Image (cartoon, grey):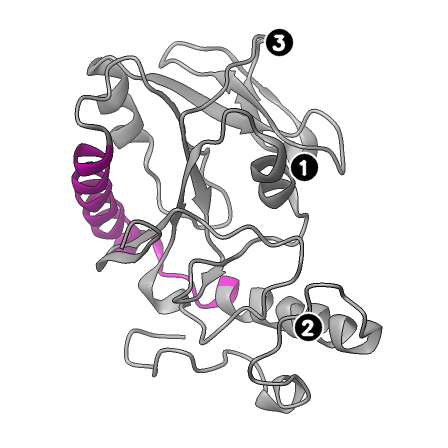
Amino acid sequence: MSDTDRPGGYASSPCMAAEIAPDYFDPLATDRQQAQDVALWRKAQRGALLEARPGAAQRLPIAQALAKHLDALLAERFGDLKGQVVSGYWPIKSEADLRPWMLRLMRGGATMALPVVAARAAPLVFRPWTIDMPMRRGHWNILEPDTDDTVIPTIALAPLVGWDGKGYRLGYGGGYFDRTLAVLQPPAFAIGVGFQGARLRTIYPQPHDIRLDAIVTEAGMQWSAMS
């Protein structure tokens, strides 16, 4: 998918999506076949969107633009971030690298954290992260802070594989962020961060999908629950 594609176009064959009602939202998940169709459609979307992600040379200016838009959003919502606990992410699978932005927030007085899979099929935990923090390999070989300390984020970034204009996120399929946001207390201000070209007309939200508080891409704010 490129920036010239129509928003809402499908990255995979439309034949699978055609079997899903355009306004599908099944809060009780009573139609098992339709839920399975949605799962298959999402799997196809993930593969296509990951394949279409920008190359390394493109990702640097994208990350810089994302940082600028995140600064504007957080300044409007929180003002000074000193004392806030901000959960970022360690980039994988050609995600935009926001670690320079995270370090800048840290220098400004924010506590930075990274999400960690402590147990499979369980909510994430958040471990504090600093520039000199030793790192270790965790689940799926992702680097994570080498500490057992945990923090509760007030702001949490959620990397997007895909997204729609109603605030819903298509992730990697494990359900970790949705599972976490559903139980996190006090709730964090959840911001989806991703590429403009990853927009979908809808992700066909399921009962477990949690609507984000905001979605930001290199093109700016795309969704806000405050609007």
Which residues lie in the magenta part? Answer: 50-77
Secondary structure beneath dot 3 equals: loop
**Residue at mark 2 to residue at mark 1: CA–CA distance:** 25 Å
Residue of label 2? 38
* Amino acid at dot 2: Val
Q: Is residue 53 magenta?
A: yes
Left or right of 52 in this view: 149: right
Residue of label 1? 140
Q: Earlier in the sequence, mark 3 or mark 1?
A: 1
Query: How far from the left and from the top, in percent, is residue 206?
Result: 65, 62
* Amino acid at dot 1: Trp
Q: Nearer the viewer, residue 193 or 168?
A: 168
For image coordinates 20% across by 50% down, the residue present is: 61
Quarter of the picture holding the C terminus: bottom left
Query: How far from the left and from the top, in percent, is residue 174?
Result: 68, 48
> Which numbered mark, 3 or 2, is in the foreground of this view?
2
* Amino acid at dot 3: Asp
Within-10-Å neighbours for mark 1: few <14, some 14–19, many 20+: few
Q: Could you tell me what secondary structure mostly forms the magenta stretch?
A: helix
Q: Is residue 114 magenta?
A: no
For image coordinates 38% across by 13% down, the residue present is: 130
For image coordinates 66% across by 47% down, the residue present is: 175
Query: Which image quadrant for residue 79?
Result: top left
